Amino acid sequence: MIDKNSPVPIYHQLEEYIKNQIESGTLEPEATIPSERELSERYQISRMTVRQALNNLVTEGFLYRQKGRGTFVSKRKVEQQLQGLTSFTEDMLARGFKPSNTLISFEIIPVDVHVAQRLKVAEHTPVYEIKRVRMADDVPMALETTYVPANLVKGLTEEIINHSLYRYVEEKLSLIISEASQEIESAVAKDSEVLHLQIQKGAPVLLIQRTSYLEDGTPFEFVKSAYRADRYKFVHSMKRTVK
């Protein structure tokens, strides 16, 4: 497994070996990784080399550490294709997960200038502000704040929010959802995200801002989300267009 005569750095060889075991299912999610000392003795390599390999795998999200307990295999990340517009509920169901929400707050507020610009409404227009934790198989995936114009999407309730906003808009209000624009960037988790997503302080998150539009171009939703970077990743296929 470890070839000390190879030009490939030993830490990288160990890293790839553990990664292959995870991807093949030999090491299952939540499996305990042997200690640095055990790996060092098993493969006759320095503990510094082992530490570098494990640190890289933690950074890449293949492993995670718990203070006082050890190093473990991370759960499989949820993949979301960047093509197509689906709700969180639809996306989780399509991947075989059970979606659910923990509602933090649900109220009508006068919209501030930033959100008003996104929704193309006047400042102080009434909007629903919905704060919730999005769950997959009861595991926190994202902390989300959604803004919906109250004069456009009427009759919204907590019960509807706990099921599917998109289904209500399309099936009950007979409005056609057409497209969305989305921005994604990485960041370090804030205190509120650490609390609600049950992640460690300083953990990475994916920040997403999305504005969704009806068929006539009217914005009906602006969403700000913080996704756990250790449980979620986005996949995008691209075609070369240069001729």
Image: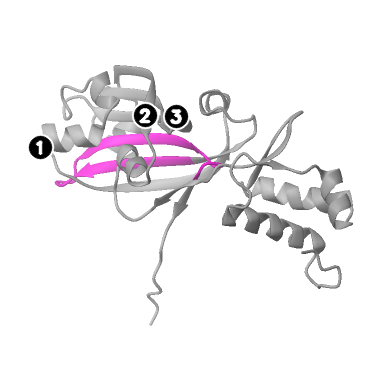
Q: Is residue 64 above or below residue 3?
A: above
Q: On the rendered structure, is 44 left or right of 71? A: right
Dominant secondary structure of the magenta stretch?
strand
| Residue 138, numbered circle | 3
Q: Residues within 10 Å of mark 3 (few under 14, many from 20)?
A: few
Q: Which residue is rendered at x = 77% and y = 44% of the image?
A: 34
Query: Which residues are drawn in magenta?
Result: 207-232
Residue tagged 1? 174
Q: Residue furthest front?
A: 26
Q: Nearer the viewer, mark 1 or mark 2?
A: 2
The answer to which of marks 3 and 2 sits earlier in the sequence is 2
The amino acid sitting under disc 2 is: Ser
Q: Quadrant of the C terminus?
A: bottom left
Q: Is residue 213 magenta?
A: yes
| Residue 100, numbered circle | 2
Q: Position of residue 47 (x, y in %)?
A: 87, 49
